[in-house]
Amino acid sequence: MITNTELEYKGDQYPSAVLEVKQEADSIFFSTGNNVILKVTVLRDSLLRFRYTTKGYFSNDFSYAIDKTQSHGYNFLELTEGADVYQIKTNKVVCMIRKADLRVAIFDLNGNIILEDESGFHWEENYHFGGNIVKMSKISHEGESYYGMGDKASHSNLKGKRVENWAMDQYAFHKDQEPLYKVVPFYIGLHNKKAYGIFFDNTFRTCFDFAHERRNVTSFWAEGGEMNYYFIYGPDMADVVTTYTHLTGKPEMPPMWTLGYHQCKWSYYPESKVKEITSKFRELRIPCDGIYLDIDYMEGFRCFTWNKEYFPDPKRMVAELAEDGFKTVVIIDPGIKIDPNYWVYKEALDKDYFCKRADGPYMKGKVWPGECNFPDYTNPEVREWWAGLFKELIAEIGVKGVWNDMNEPAVMEVPGKTFPMDVRHDYDGNPCSHRKAHNIYGTQMARATYEGVKRFAYPKRPFIITRSAYSGAQRYTSSWTGDNVASWEHLWIANIQMQRMSISGMGFTGSDIGGFAEQPSGELYARWIQLGVFHPFCRTHSSGDHGEQEPWSFDSEVVDITRKFVELRYKLLPYLYTMFWDYVNDGVPMLKPLVYFDQEDIQTHYRTDEFLFGNQILVCPILEPNAQGRRMYLPRGNWYNYWTNEWICGGKELWVSTAYNEIPIFIKEGAIIPNYPIQQYVGEKKFEEISLEVYYKEGKEKSTLYEDAQDGYDYNKGRYSHSTFSFRGKEKEVTILQHKEGKFVTDYNKYRVRFYGLPFEIGKVQIDNEEVNLKDVLVGKNELLVDKDFTELHIAAKGLKK
């Protein structure tokens, strides 16, 4: 019998007093009497890393999340000692470390508290697995709100919630269900109109409590690993999000076709069914770029094979689909069927690439093919092998994209739905159990897939989509939110999830439009299309178990609504592509919740429905049946109703009437929105002109337009066109200045400039300071056709002298 209570149960332990402090370049080490070391690293003036160890030394510093290609640097760093604290000062913040117990408090330069430890760092020894359960608790300030955390089916403001991070297959999940498919341990705190961020880079199962258990305390903890978190100061939420996105990485530009509309089902087969679906899109004139093949295209669900009965000549089929504008995307899962006659299995077995249990045998689990082994994607040699497997699919058959599913990893008919925790992983030379590797398994699969598709698609850009992901996965892949349900609740959830993913660094995300499980009504499908076209990734997908879910599966009114909104998306492709350029270059989220748009307005802090699509289009979906309108909050500023062109002053809640074939959409005044002509697929037409939709404002506004070849890598060599439009409106005149960068030359030569809300009749037009004949440029009321390369366009009212 154990009678020593210290040995039987130690409980929470805390750092003792600081005994030694030393500085090495950008890092400061605080060592305590009980072997705790806190390492504070100043990466930027507003970005600090806090890393703790309880054993007197640090283990190898390795992270899958951090983008090592990103450079950091600070302008000022000063360490001073006071009576009770050590002070670290940068150009943005002051960090106080308490001598007695290592508790941390961070202030702005005016002395206002930003973030403050409650109990601070503490830990509990894990006698069952070894190592520590590491914990951190912070004070939750009055009125503080919390956002982010990626793939969560909860209210956008997480105050009062507890969430869990453990990648899990959650078929037909529901509101507030935890955990889900993705792990993004990053949140944004906001209080006193100042925002900060915390990224807890720990791949073990983690939990975050946002003043749920104790109303004045926010805490986060992990079942193993280190207490290793990054603090990011704003004070604007925009600065927090962009800094986090730089830290964990940004994608490359996607091919433009991936931003079109996609159609998917479990499953489209045989070939005749695929052709029937694609032909119907063209017949009904509903634009579509992507067609997906689910697991039934394979021979017995074996990855990298084709069912020759369903698809006797896949290369010919893929080429014929491409002639009609469809890009083929195929699914690839991690489970490799145990079959000695299956070449992929045999190669992995010969090379010893499968995951093993702790006592030696290969991990075995049941998924779609039956009993399977699973590659260890945390081994760089395995990733290289996996990448090479895509040669036939991509280079020879001509598939354009790959869809990674079941990669949480999901395993059927076992408790926990995943690998046993004793499974071993290489972890890039840092061997560990599945407890540590589980949350990044899907990301490393997507990474290996990305490297293969990129290699064999060159000189075109790759397209990967994944269900499971950890922070940083956006460098390799897009994503979708998994097996949702055809319900109005899930329409609300999809809206929340996409906004949350966007401010959590993973912008290229969408939901299964219409719901994966169960069957939507025509009205629900129509409302989901109306929302889905404003999400970065836009795809209808269904299980097929409950009926058909193509647009024409419903009545003709739904077909018309689908066409209308998909055409709107295709018109807005240059705007969406420009949004992506801002995301890729500056880490700017493509979707912006209202609190991101105006954090100083307290009315935005709990809004869930409305969001900014890019910088200048406000979208508010209809989320209830039988609605003939809805109340919504129009943020501060002035806006135009997209459908009526009515000018409305914001900063208030209002009723907006909408027909069944509309949702509330508003354009920020002063905006210049580029539009393409409608195409049935990206690249169908060469344009002679594009339109610039100009919304009058008395004042100034900036808009941008990014274009390149829509695929390939020439944009990295300066072959792109980036125009900045500076709008200046006065009572009787308007000036638009255009500044262009880049060497790309577009096919079109003209802008069709349409003015909305113009308070005067156009009487005079000057282009580059030369007056032109109105008859040469005025092609309709408030509509001009001008050369695309103008640097200054000036219009004035009739009779106005200058």
Image (cartoon, rainbow, N blue to C red):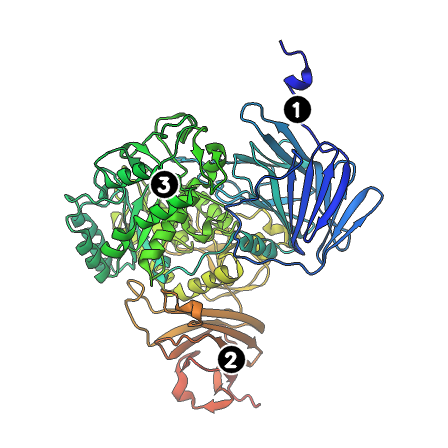
Q: Nearer the viewer, mark 2 or mark 3?
A: 3
Q: In the shown orientation, is residue 51 left or right of residue 578? A: right
Q: Mark 2 or 3 closer to N-term? A: 3
Q: Look at mark 3 in the image and give the residue it sits on.
A: 486
| Tag in front: 2 or 1 | 1
Q: Residues within 10 Å of mark 3 (few under 14, many from 20)?
A: many
| The C terminus: image quadrant | bottom right
Residue highlighted by disc 1? 11
**In the rendered picture of this protein, how many numbered marks are placed on residues?**
3
Along the line of sight, the residue nearer the viewer: 650 or 41: 41
Residue bearing the label numbered 2: 760
Badge 1, how many Cα within 10 Å: few under 14, some, many 20+?
Answer: few
| Image location of residue 635, percent across then percent down | 57, 57
SS at circle 3: loop
Eyeballing the image, is 746 above or below 462?
below
Question: Which quarter of the picture shows residue 411?
Answer: top left
Q: Amino acid at mark 3?
A: Ala
Amino acid type indicated by mark 2: Phe
- Which residue reaches farthest right? 83
Q: Residue at x 31, y 43 (%)?
A: 542
- Name which quarter of the figure residue 11 lies in: top right
N-terminal of the pair, mark 1 or mark 3, is: 1
Where in the figure is residue 535, as x and y percent of width and height? 42, 54
Direction top: furthest residue? 1
Q: Residue at x 28, y 58 (%)?
A: 286
Q: CA distance from mark 2 to mark 1?
A: 75 Å
Tell me the element at label 2: loop
- Who is closer to the viewer here, 58 or 597? 58
Q: Distance between the Cα atoms at labels 1 and 3?
A: 46 Å
Residue 88 or 323: which is nearer the viewer? 88
| 2 and 3 marks in contact (CB < 8 Å) | no
